[in-house]
Image: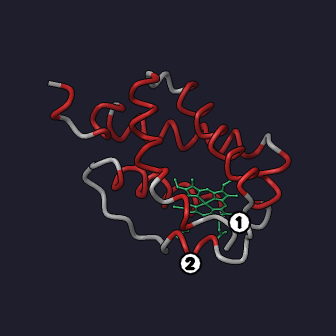
Amino acid sequence: TTSEQSVYAQMGGQQKVEEVVDNFITEIEFDPVIYEYFKDSNIDRFREKLIEHVCHLTGGPCEYTGDTMVQVHTGMDITETDFNRGVDLFINAMDKAQISHPIQNKVLAILAKTRKEMLYI
Ligand code: HEM
């Protein structure tokens, strides 16, 4: 049954994770507030590491080879307001990849656990 599958599989596997991350990057590019944080970043690296990270956290067959969330986001001083805006962009990205709302909620619940590792640091 669905509940026995990983959230990764429920999302639609690697292809869907990549689609969501690509949509998320597009959302970031069109959002002046969030883009400001990324303007000097290596987007190819961000894409690769975020795909691994989402795959790994949702129970997919990936190893995460990037830096820790604390290491990466330290010095950015991301506010709660901006973070929530980033989450909205991620939701838009999942909507555009036609991930159902029940599955989106499962993904968000998993990602929410890392929230404290990114805010006000
Ligand atoms: C508004 C919220 C966020 C902002 C402003 C933000 C900002 C950034 C920026 C600017 C980078 C690139 C750093 C660099 O150039 O070296 C980055 C990397 C990264 N972020 Fe975030 N981030 C946010 C939320 C998140 C969330 C929710 C996740 C997890 C789902 C996440 C996961 C990552 C990963 C995996 C990397 C790549 C790590 C690496 O290169 O080793 N970020 N973030």
Residue 37 percent coordinates (x, y): 77, 61
Is label 2 in a helix, a strand or a loop? helix
Q: Which mark, by number, is residue 18?
A: none
**Whole-percent x, y for residue 74 in the image:** 65, 76
Q: Nearer the viewer, mark 1 or mark 2?
A: 2
- Mark 2 and ligand 1: say if the CB distance to the nearest ligand atom is below 8 Å: yes
Residue corresponding to mark 2: 71
User: In the image shown, does 8 or 40 lie closer to the viewer?
Assistant: 8
Q: Residue at x 64, y 64 (%)?
A: 119
Numbered mark located on residue 41 in the image: 1
Q: x and y percent of residue 29 in the render? A: 76, 45
Q: Quadrant of the C terminus?
A: bottom right
Q: Quarter containing ligand 1?
A: bottom right
Q: Is mark 1 within 8 Å of ligand 1?
A: yes
* Crowd rating for badge 1 (residues with CA inside 10 Å; few <14, some 14–19, many 20+): few
Residue 53 rendering spot, x and y as whole percentages: 42, 57
Q: Residue at (60%, 37%) from the top-left corner? A: 23
Mark 1 to mark 2: distance in Å? 15 Å
Residue shown at 19%/35% (left/top)? 5
Q: Amino acid at mark 1?
A: Ser
Say if 7 sits above or below 57 in the image. above
